[in-house]
Amino acid sequence: MGMTLAEKVWADHLVVQGEQGAPDLLYIDLMLMHEVTSPQAFEGLRLAGRTPRHLDQLIATEDHNTPTVDIDMPNPDETSALQLTTLERNCQEFGVRLHPLGDADQGIVHAFAPMLGLTQPGMTIVCGDSHTSTHGAFGALAFGIGTSEVEHVMATQTLSLKPFKTMAITIDGDLPEGVTAKDIILAIIAKIGTGGGQGYVLEYRGKAIEQLSMDARMTICNMSIEAGARAGMIAPDETTFEYLKGRPHAPQGELWDQAVEYWRTLRTDDDATFDAEVVITAEDLEPFVTWGTNPGQGLPISASIPDPESIADATERTAAEHAIEYMGLTPGQKIKDIAVDTVFIGSCTNGRIEDLRAAAEIMKGRKKADSIHRVLVVPASSRIRLQAEQEGLDQIFKDFGAEWRNAGCSMCLGVNPDKLVPGERSISTSNRNFEGRQGKGSRTHLASPQVAAATAVRGTISSPADL
Protein backbone atom coordinates (compact mmCIF):
# COMPACT_ATOMS: atom_id res chain seq x y z
CA MET A 1 0.00 0.00 0.00
CA GLY A 2 1.31 3.47 -0.90
CA MET A 3 2.48 5.95 1.72
CA THR A 4 1.98 9.68 2.14
CA LEU A 5 4.94 12.03 2.53
CA ALA A 6 4.36 12.29 6.28
CA GLU A 7 4.14 8.53 6.67
CA LYS A 8 7.44 8.06 4.82
CA VAL A 9 9.31 10.48 7.07
CA TRP A 10 7.72 8.91 10.15
CA ALA A 11 8.73 5.40 9.05
CA ASP A 12 12.32 6.50 8.38
CA HIS A 13 12.63 7.77 11.96
CA LEU A 14 10.83 4.98 13.80
CA VAL A 15 12.97 3.65 16.67
CA VAL A 16 10.33 1.52 18.40
CA GLN A 17 6.77 0.94 17.25
CA GLY A 18 4.23 1.12 20.05
CA GLU A 19 2.12 -1.93 20.80
CA GLN A 20 -1.61 -2.04 21.56
CA GLY A 21 -2.19 1.68 21.09
CA ALA A 22 1.00 2.82 22.83
CA PRO A 23 2.95 5.72 21.25
CA ASP A 24 5.81 5.16 18.82
CA LEU A 25 9.33 6.29 19.64
CA LEU A 26 10.75 8.59 16.96
CA TYR A 27 14.30 9.75 16.39
CA ILE A 28 14.62 13.56 16.20
CA ASP A 29 17.15 15.00 13.76
CA LEU A 30 17.15 18.61 14.91
CA MET A 31 15.86 20.59 17.86
CA LEU A 32 15.68 24.37 17.73
CA MET A 33 15.63 26.31 20.99
CA HIS A 34 14.93 29.84 22.24
CA GLU A 35 14.68 31.67 25.54
CA VAL A 36 11.00 31.12 26.35
CA THR A 37 10.53 27.35 26.53
CA SER A 38 14.06 26.16 27.34
CA PRO A 39 14.79 27.23 30.97
CA GLN A 40 12.76 24.46 32.63
CA ALA A 41 14.25 21.86 30.26
CA PHE A 42 17.80 22.87 31.12
CA GLU A 43 16.94 22.85 34.81
CA GLY A 44 15.46 19.37 34.47
CA LEU A 45 18.72 18.09 32.99
CA ARG A 46 20.68 19.84 35.71
CA LEU A 47 18.61 18.31 38.52
CA ALA A 48 18.85 14.83 36.99
CA GLY A 49 22.58 15.11 36.39
CA ARG A 50 22.13 14.55 32.65
CA THR A 51 23.81 16.11 29.63
CA PRO A 52 22.46 16.54 26.07
CA ARG A 53 22.82 13.34 24.04
CA HIS A 54 23.73 15.00 20.73
CA LEU A 55 24.92 18.58 21.04
CA ASP A 56 25.42 18.87 17.29
CA GLN A 57 21.67 18.39 16.81
CA LEU A 58 20.68 21.24 19.11
CA ILE A 59 20.88 24.94 18.25
CA ALA A 60 19.52 28.00 20.00
CA THR A 61 18.79 31.62 19.19
CA GLU A 62 17.23 34.62 20.91
CA ASP A 63 14.02 35.88 19.34
CA HIS A 64 10.83 36.29 21.41
CA ASN A 65 12.14 38.70 24.03
CA THR A 66 14.75 40.56 22.01
CA PRO A 67 14.33 44.32 21.67
CA THR A 68 14.18 45.56 18.07
CA VAL A 69 15.74 48.97 18.80
CA ASP A 70 18.82 49.98 20.80
CA ILE A 71 20.06 46.41 20.95
CA ASP A 72 23.43 47.61 22.25
CA MET A 73 21.74 49.12 25.32
CA PRO A 74 20.49 47.33 28.48
CA ASN A 75 17.13 45.66 27.90
CA PRO A 76 14.49 47.92 29.50
CA ASP A 77 12.20 44.96 30.23
CA GLU A 78 13.46 43.08 33.29
CA THR A 79 11.60 39.84 32.53
CA SER A 80 12.87 39.76 28.95
CA ALA A 81 16.42 40.53 30.05
CA LEU A 82 16.30 37.69 32.59
CA GLN A 83 15.06 35.17 30.02
CA LEU A 84 17.79 36.12 27.58
CA THR A 85 20.62 35.98 30.11
CA THR A 86 19.28 32.66 31.44
CA LEU A 87 19.44 31.14 27.95
CA GLU A 88 22.97 32.42 27.50
CA ARG A 89 24.11 30.89 30.80
CA ASN A 90 22.38 27.58 30.10
CA CYS A 91 23.83 27.25 26.60
CA GLN A 92 27.31 28.04 27.89
CA GLU A 93 27.01 25.51 30.74
CA PHE A 94 25.69 22.67 28.56
CA GLY A 95 27.65 23.48 25.40
CA VAL A 96 24.65 24.25 23.18
CA ARG A 97 25.42 26.43 20.16
CA LEU A 98 23.72 29.83 20.52
CA HIS A 99 23.18 32.77 18.17
CA PRO A 100 22.49 35.63 20.61
CA LEU A 101 21.28 39.16 20.02
CA GLY A 102 23.86 41.00 17.91
CA ASP A 103 25.10 37.83 16.19
CA ALA A 104 24.87 37.90 12.38
CA ASP A 105 22.87 34.65 12.40
CA GLN A 106 20.47 35.62 15.19
CA GLY A 107 16.80 35.75 14.32
CA ILE A 108 13.41 34.18 14.76
CA VAL A 109 14.02 30.48 15.26
CA HIS A 110 11.96 29.53 12.19
CA ALA A 111 13.80 31.99 9.93
CA PHE A 112 17.45 31.57 10.82
CA ALA A 113 17.54 27.75 10.58
CA PRO A 114 16.39 27.48 6.93
CA MET A 115 18.83 30.22 5.91
CA LEU A 116 21.70 28.23 7.45
CA GLY A 117 20.61 25.09 5.61
CA LEU A 118 19.84 23.34 8.90
CA THR A 119 16.29 22.61 7.74
CA GLN A 120 16.35 19.82 5.16
CA PRO A 121 13.86 17.44 3.47
CA GLY A 122 13.00 14.26 5.30
CA MET A 123 14.14 15.48 8.70
CA THR A 124 12.24 15.41 11.97
CA ILE A 125 12.47 18.86 13.55
CA VAL A 126 11.04 20.02 16.88
CA CYS A 127 11.05 23.19 18.95
CA GLY A 128 9.20 24.48 21.98
CA ASP A 129 7.22 26.74 19.68
CA SER A 130 3.98 26.02 17.83
CA HIS A 131 5.11 27.57 14.54
CA THR A 132 7.79 24.93 14.06
CA SER A 133 5.43 23.70 11.33
CA THR A 134 7.20 26.32 9.15
CA HIS A 135 9.98 23.85 8.38
CA GLY A 136 7.53 21.45 6.75
CA ALA A 137 7.87 23.62 3.63
CA PHE A 138 11.05 21.63 2.93
CA GLY A 139 9.39 18.23 3.25
CA ALA A 140 10.43 17.89 6.88
CA LEU A 141 8.12 16.60 9.60
CA ALA A 142 8.30 19.56 11.97
CA PHE A 143 6.12 20.42 14.94
CA GLY A 144 6.04 22.23 18.25
CA ILE A 145 6.52 20.42 21.56
CA GLY A 146 6.09 21.18 25.25
CA THR A 147 8.77 22.00 27.80
CA SER A 148 8.95 18.47 29.26
CA GLU A 149 9.33 17.13 25.72
CA VAL A 150 12.15 19.61 25.09
CA GLU A 151 13.98 18.09 28.04
CA HIS A 152 13.29 14.57 26.76
CA VAL A 153 14.72 15.34 23.33
CA MET A 154 17.80 16.97 24.85
CA ALA A 155 18.43 13.89 26.98
CA THR A 156 17.59 11.15 24.45
CA GLN A 157 17.27 12.71 20.97
CA THR A 158 13.95 10.86 20.71
CA LEU A 159 10.28 11.63 21.28
CA SER A 160 7.30 9.46 22.16
CA LEU A 161 4.34 10.16 19.85
CA LYS A 162 1.22 8.58 18.47
CA PRO A 163 1.01 8.66 14.65
CA PHE A 164 -0.88 11.61 13.17
CA LYS A 165 -3.69 11.43 10.66
CA THR A 166 -3.05 12.92 7.22
CA MET A 167 -4.99 15.50 5.23
CA ALA A 168 -4.35 16.54 1.62
CA ILE A 169 -5.06 20.18 0.78
CA THR A 170 -4.91 20.69 -2.97
CA ILE A 171 -4.86 24.15 -4.54
CA ASP A 172 -5.67 23.54 -8.20
CA GLY A 173 -4.85 25.98 -11.00
CA ASP A 174 -3.02 29.30 -11.21
CA LEU A 175 -3.25 32.07 -8.62
CA PRO A 176 -4.78 35.35 -9.80
CA GLU A 177 -2.51 38.38 -9.87
CA GLY A 178 -2.11 39.91 -6.42
CA VAL A 179 -2.94 36.71 -4.52
CA THR A 180 -0.16 35.48 -2.23
CA ALA A 181 0.73 32.54 -0.02
CA LYS A 182 -0.73 34.39 2.98
CA ASP A 183 -4.05 34.67 1.17
CA ILE A 184 -3.98 30.95 0.41
CA ILE A 185 -3.49 29.90 4.02
CA LEU A 186 -6.01 32.41 5.39
CA ALA A 187 -8.55 31.08 2.88
CA ILE A 188 -7.79 27.49 3.92
CA ILE A 189 -8.24 28.27 7.63
CA ALA A 190 -11.47 30.16 6.91
CA LYS A 191 -12.72 27.10 5.02
CA ILE A 192 -11.81 24.28 7.44
CA GLY A 193 -11.83 26.30 10.69
CA THR A 194 -9.29 26.73 13.45
CA GLY A 195 -9.93 23.15 14.57
CA GLY A 196 -10.30 21.59 11.13
CA GLY A 197 -6.77 20.21 11.10
CA GLN A 198 -6.74 18.91 14.66
CA GLY A 199 -4.77 15.66 14.84
CA TYR A 200 -3.63 15.91 11.22
CA VAL A 201 -0.48 16.56 9.27
CA LEU A 202 -1.56 18.74 6.36
CA GLU A 203 0.12 18.16 3.00
CA TYR A 204 -0.25 21.10 0.61
CA ARG A 205 -0.35 20.04 -3.03
CA GLY A 206 -1.40 21.18 -6.48
CA LYS A 207 -0.12 23.45 -9.23
CA ALA A 208 -0.54 26.67 -7.25
CA ILE A 209 1.61 25.26 -4.41
CA GLU A 210 4.29 23.93 -6.75
CA GLN A 211 4.70 27.38 -8.31
CA LEU A 212 5.46 29.03 -4.96
CA SER A 213 8.94 30.06 -3.80
CA MET A 214 10.42 28.62 -0.62
CA ASP A 215 9.67 31.83 1.29
CA ALA A 216 6.02 31.53 0.24
CA ARG A 217 5.86 27.84 1.10
CA MET A 218 7.20 28.59 4.58
CA THR A 219 4.40 31.14 5.05
CA ILE A 220 1.78 28.49 4.32
CA CYS A 221 3.29 25.75 6.48
CA ASN A 222 3.90 28.25 9.27
CA MET A 223 0.17 28.84 9.76
CA SER A 224 -0.83 25.16 9.65
CA ILE A 225 -0.98 25.30 13.42
CA GLU A 226 -3.65 28.01 13.17
CA ALA A 227 -5.93 25.38 11.60
CA GLY A 228 -5.29 23.15 14.60
CA ALA A 229 -2.87 20.86 12.72
CA ARG A 230 0.21 19.27 14.25
CA ALA A 231 2.26 20.00 11.14
CA GLY A 232 2.15 21.11 7.54
CA MET A 233 4.29 19.70 4.72
CA ILE A 234 5.11 20.32 1.07
CA ALA A 235 6.99 17.74 -0.98
CA PRO A 236 10.55 18.82 -1.87
CA ASP A 237 11.32 19.59 -5.51
CA GLU A 238 13.78 21.53 -7.64
CA THR A 239 12.75 24.78 -5.93
CA THR A 240 13.69 23.23 -2.58
CA PHE A 241 17.03 21.93 -3.83
CA GLU A 242 17.96 25.26 -5.42
CA TYR A 243 17.22 27.07 -2.16
CA LEU A 244 19.36 24.71 -0.07
CA LYS A 245 22.38 24.24 -2.34
CA GLY A 246 25.47 25.98 -1.05
CA ARG A 247 24.06 26.97 2.33
CA PRO A 248 26.44 26.52 5.30
CA HIS A 249 24.91 23.32 6.70
CA ALA A 250 23.68 21.79 3.44
CA PRO A 251 25.47 18.65 2.22
CA GLN A 252 28.39 19.27 -0.15
CA GLY A 253 29.88 17.39 -3.11
CA GLU A 254 29.08 13.69 -3.24
CA LEU A 255 26.98 13.95 -0.09
CA TRP A 256 24.80 16.55 -1.83
CA ASP A 257 24.13 14.15 -4.71
CA GLN A 258 23.25 11.37 -2.26
CA ALA A 259 20.96 13.67 -0.31
CA VAL A 260 19.08 14.85 -3.40
CA GLU A 261 18.66 11.24 -4.53
CA TYR A 262 16.93 10.48 -1.21
CA TRP A 263 14.98 13.73 -1.17
CA ARG A 264 13.43 12.92 -4.55
CA THR A 265 11.77 9.87 -2.97
CA LEU A 266 9.92 12.08 -0.49
CA ARG A 267 6.66 12.35 -2.38
CA THR A 268 3.27 10.86 -1.62
CA ASP A 269 2.79 7.65 -3.61
CA ASP A 270 0.08 7.65 -6.26
CA ASP A 271 -1.80 4.88 -4.47
CA ALA A 272 -1.50 6.42 -1.00
CA THR A 273 -4.68 7.24 0.92
CA PHE A 274 -5.24 10.36 3.02
CA ASP A 275 -7.61 10.40 5.98
CA ALA A 276 -9.18 13.59 4.65
CA GLU A 277 -8.94 15.81 1.58
CA VAL A 278 -9.74 19.45 0.78
CA VAL A 279 -9.69 21.00 -2.69
CA ILE A 280 -9.63 24.74 -3.44
CA THR A 281 -9.65 26.34 -6.87
CA ALA A 282 -6.84 28.88 -7.09
CA GLU A 283 -8.67 31.12 -9.54
CA ASP A 284 -11.42 31.71 -6.95
CA LEU A 285 -9.02 33.27 -4.44
CA GLU A 286 -8.40 36.97 -3.77
CA PRO A 287 -6.54 38.84 -1.02
CA PHE A 288 -7.81 37.74 2.41
CA VAL A 289 -8.05 39.66 5.68
CA THR A 290 -9.22 38.57 9.13
CA TRP A 291 -12.02 40.59 10.73
CA GLY A 292 -12.42 38.74 14.04
CA THR A 293 -10.34 37.39 16.89
CA ASN A 294 -9.01 34.13 15.47
CA PRO A 295 -7.31 33.31 12.14
CA GLY A 296 -10.41 31.44 10.94
CA GLN A 297 -12.53 34.58 11.01
CA GLY A 298 -11.30 35.82 7.65
CA LEU A 299 -12.90 36.97 4.41
CA PRO A 300 -11.92 38.20 0.95
CA ILE A 301 -10.90 41.85 1.16
CA SER A 302 -13.86 42.81 -1.05
CA ALA A 303 -16.36 41.42 1.49
CA SER A 304 -18.18 43.00 4.44
CA ILE A 305 -18.28 42.20 8.15
CA PRO A 306 -20.78 39.34 8.58
CA ASP A 307 -24.12 39.73 10.30
CA PRO A 308 -24.18 37.24 13.20
CA GLU A 309 -27.93 36.82 12.70
CA SER A 310 -27.18 35.11 9.38
CA ILE A 311 -24.95 32.46 11.02
CA ALA A 312 -26.94 29.28 11.63
CA ASP A 313 -24.56 27.59 14.09
CA ALA A 314 -25.23 28.98 17.58
CA THR A 315 -21.62 28.66 18.76
CA GLU A 316 -20.24 30.39 15.68
CA ARG A 317 -22.92 33.08 15.94
CA THR A 318 -21.98 33.85 19.54
CA ALA A 319 -18.29 33.90 18.66
CA ALA A 320 -18.97 36.32 15.80
CA GLU A 321 -21.02 38.63 18.04
CA HIS A 322 -18.24 38.74 20.61
CA ALA A 323 -15.51 39.25 18.00
CA ILE A 324 -17.38 42.11 16.30
CA GLU A 325 -17.90 43.84 19.65
CA TYR A 326 -14.26 43.38 20.69
CA MET A 327 -12.96 44.57 17.32
CA GLY A 328 -15.20 47.64 17.35
CA LEU A 329 -16.84 46.79 14.03
CA THR A 330 -20.37 46.88 12.62
CA PRO A 331 -22.18 44.06 10.75
CA GLY A 332 -22.30 44.93 7.07
CA GLN A 333 -19.35 47.31 7.29
CA LYS A 334 -17.07 46.97 4.27
CA ILE A 335 -13.64 45.61 5.14
CA LYS A 336 -12.06 48.26 2.94
CA ASP A 337 -13.72 50.98 5.06
CA ILE A 338 -11.89 49.90 8.23
CA ALA A 339 -9.34 52.52 9.29
CA VAL A 340 -6.07 51.26 10.78
CA ASP A 341 -3.74 52.92 13.31
CA THR A 342 -0.60 50.78 13.06
CA VAL A 343 0.98 48.56 10.40
CA PHE A 344 3.29 45.67 11.36
CA ILE A 345 5.33 43.88 8.70
CA GLY A 346 7.40 41.02 10.11
CA SER A 347 7.19 37.75 12.13
CA CYS A 348 8.11 34.15 11.30
CA THR A 349 5.16 34.17 8.89
CA ASN A 350 6.02 37.15 6.71
CA GLY A 351 9.35 38.67 7.73
CA ARG A 352 11.49 37.11 5.00
CA ILE A 353 13.32 38.87 2.21
CA GLU A 354 10.59 38.30 -0.39
CA ASP A 355 8.03 39.76 2.01
CA LEU A 356 10.18 42.86 2.55
CA ARG A 357 10.72 43.24 -1.19
CA ALA A 358 6.98 43.03 -1.83
CA ALA A 359 6.22 45.68 0.78
CA ALA A 360 9.03 47.94 -0.46
CA GLU A 361 7.78 47.72 -4.04
CA ILE A 362 4.45 49.18 -2.93
CA MET A 363 5.96 51.80 -0.60
CA LYS A 364 8.61 53.05 -3.03
CA GLY A 365 8.00 56.66 -3.97
CA ARG A 366 5.02 56.94 -1.62
CA LYS A 367 4.42 58.20 1.93
CA LYS A 368 2.43 56.61 4.72
CA ALA A 369 -1.05 58.00 5.29
CA ASP A 370 -1.23 60.80 7.85
CA SER A 371 -3.80 58.79 9.81
CA ILE A 372 -1.36 55.90 10.32
CA HIS A 373 0.42 56.29 13.67
CA ARG A 374 3.37 54.07 12.83
CA VAL A 375 4.62 51.43 10.43
CA LEU A 376 7.00 48.85 11.89
CA VAL A 377 9.12 46.77 9.51
CA VAL A 378 10.92 44.00 11.41
CA PRO A 379 13.03 41.45 9.49
CA ALA A 380 12.77 37.87 10.70
CA SER A 381 16.54 37.42 11.04
CA SER A 382 19.73 39.45 11.08
CA ARG A 383 20.82 37.92 7.77
CA ILE A 384 17.54 39.04 6.19
CA ARG A 385 18.10 42.51 7.65
CA LEU A 386 21.60 42.68 6.16
CA GLN A 387 20.35 41.48 2.77
CA ALA A 388 17.53 44.03 2.77
CA GLU A 389 20.01 46.80 3.53
CA GLN A 390 22.31 45.63 0.74
CA GLU A 391 19.34 45.91 -1.64
CA GLY A 392 18.43 49.38 -0.34
CA LEU A 393 15.05 48.29 1.02
CA ASP A 394 15.71 49.92 4.38
CA GLN A 395 15.98 53.34 2.77
CA ILE A 396 12.68 52.81 0.94
CA PHE A 397 11.00 52.02 4.23
CA LYS A 398 12.53 55.04 5.97
CA ASP A 399 11.60 57.39 3.12
CA PHE A 400 8.05 56.07 3.31
CA GLY A 401 7.87 56.93 6.99
CA ALA A 402 8.28 53.44 8.41
CA GLU A 403 10.51 52.35 11.30
CA TRP A 404 13.25 49.92 10.24
CA ARG A 405 13.93 47.60 13.17
CA ASN A 406 16.33 44.83 14.21
CA ALA A 407 15.34 41.17 13.92
CA GLY A 408 12.96 39.52 16.37
CA CYS A 409 9.40 38.41 17.04
CA SER A 410 8.47 42.00 17.92
CA MET A 411 4.80 43.00 17.68
CA CYS A 412 3.66 39.53 16.67
CA LEU A 413 3.19 38.80 20.35
CA GLY A 414 3.59 42.26 21.85
CA VAL A 415 6.80 41.97 23.84
CA ASN A 416 8.98 44.83 25.05
CA PRO A 417 7.75 48.21 23.72
CA ASP A 418 6.52 46.63 20.46
CA LYS A 419 2.86 46.47 21.40
CA LEU A 420 -0.45 48.22 20.89
CA VAL A 421 -2.43 50.20 23.45
CA PRO A 422 -6.06 49.30 24.28
CA GLY A 423 -8.33 50.00 21.33
CA GLU A 424 -5.48 50.51 18.87
CA ARG A 425 -6.05 48.74 15.54
CA SER A 426 -3.30 47.14 13.49
CA ILE A 427 -2.97 45.31 10.24
CA SER A 428 -0.33 42.67 10.79
CA THR A 429 1.53 40.15 8.65
CA SER A 430 1.86 37.84 11.66
CA ASN A 431 -0.08 34.66 12.39
CA ARG A 432 -2.43 35.29 15.32
CA ASN A 433 -5.10 37.87 16.05
CA PHE A 434 -6.29 36.63 19.45
CA GLU A 435 -7.61 39.15 21.96
CA GLY A 436 -4.68 40.98 23.51
CA ARG A 437 -2.11 39.19 21.34
CA GLN A 438 -0.34 42.42 20.37
CA GLY A 439 -1.09 44.19 23.64
CA LYS A 440 -4.00 44.40 26.09
CA GLY A 441 -7.16 45.48 24.27
CA SER A 442 -5.40 45.47 20.89
CA ARG A 443 -7.30 44.85 17.64
CA THR A 444 -5.44 42.95 14.95
CA HIS A 445 -6.27 42.17 11.32
CA LEU A 446 -4.05 39.55 9.66
CA ALA A 447 -3.04 40.08 6.04
CA SER A 448 -0.22 39.72 3.52
CA PRO A 449 2.72 42.15 3.30
CA GLN A 450 1.21 43.54 0.08
CA VAL A 451 -2.13 44.31 1.75
CA ALA A 452 -0.36 45.70 4.84
CA ALA A 453 1.76 48.02 2.70
CA ALA A 454 -1.20 49.20 0.62
CA THR A 455 -3.10 49.86 3.86
CA ALA A 456 -0.20 51.95 5.12
CA VAL A 457 -0.51 54.09 1.98
CA ARG A 458 -4.27 54.65 2.12
CA GLY A 459 -4.99 54.45 5.86
CA THR A 460 -7.84 51.96 5.42
CA ILE A 461 -7.57 48.24 4.68
CA SER A 462 -6.59 48.06 1.01
CA SER A 463 -5.12 45.79 -1.65
CA PRO A 464 -2.38 46.88 -4.07
CA ALA A 465 -5.05 47.04 -6.78
CA ASP A 466 -6.68 49.90 -4.83
CA LEU A 467 -3.60 52.03 -5.43
Image: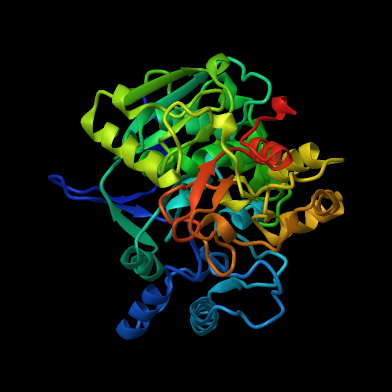
Quadrant where the N terminus lies?
top left
Q: Residue furthest left?
A: 20
Position of 147 relative to 441 (above/below): below
The answer to which image quadrant residue 256 occupies is top right
Which residue occupies the foreground of this view, 453 or 423? Answer: 423
Q: Residue at x 67, y 56 (%)?
A: 378
The x and y percentages for residue 56 are: 54, 67
Does residue 351 appear in the picture of this structure?
yes
Q: Please count the marks in the image.
A: 0
Side of 361 relative to 60 (left or right): right
Horizontally, residue 150 falls left or right of residue 241, namely left
| Residue located 70% across and 43% down the image | 456
Q: Position of residue 252 (x, y in %)?
A: 70, 50
Residue 234 shows up from this direction = no
Question: Percent position (x, y) of residue 38?
Answer: 43, 71
Specify the quadrant that holds the C terminus: top right
Residue 53 found in image quarter: bottom left
Using the image, determine if residue 237 lies above or below residue 49: above
Across and down, in percent, residue 144 comes to 40, 54
**Closer to us: 399 or 125:** 399
Judge left or right: residue 151 versus residue 113.
Answer: left
108 relative to 83, above or below? above
Q: Left or right? Give the position of 368 relative to 226.
A: right
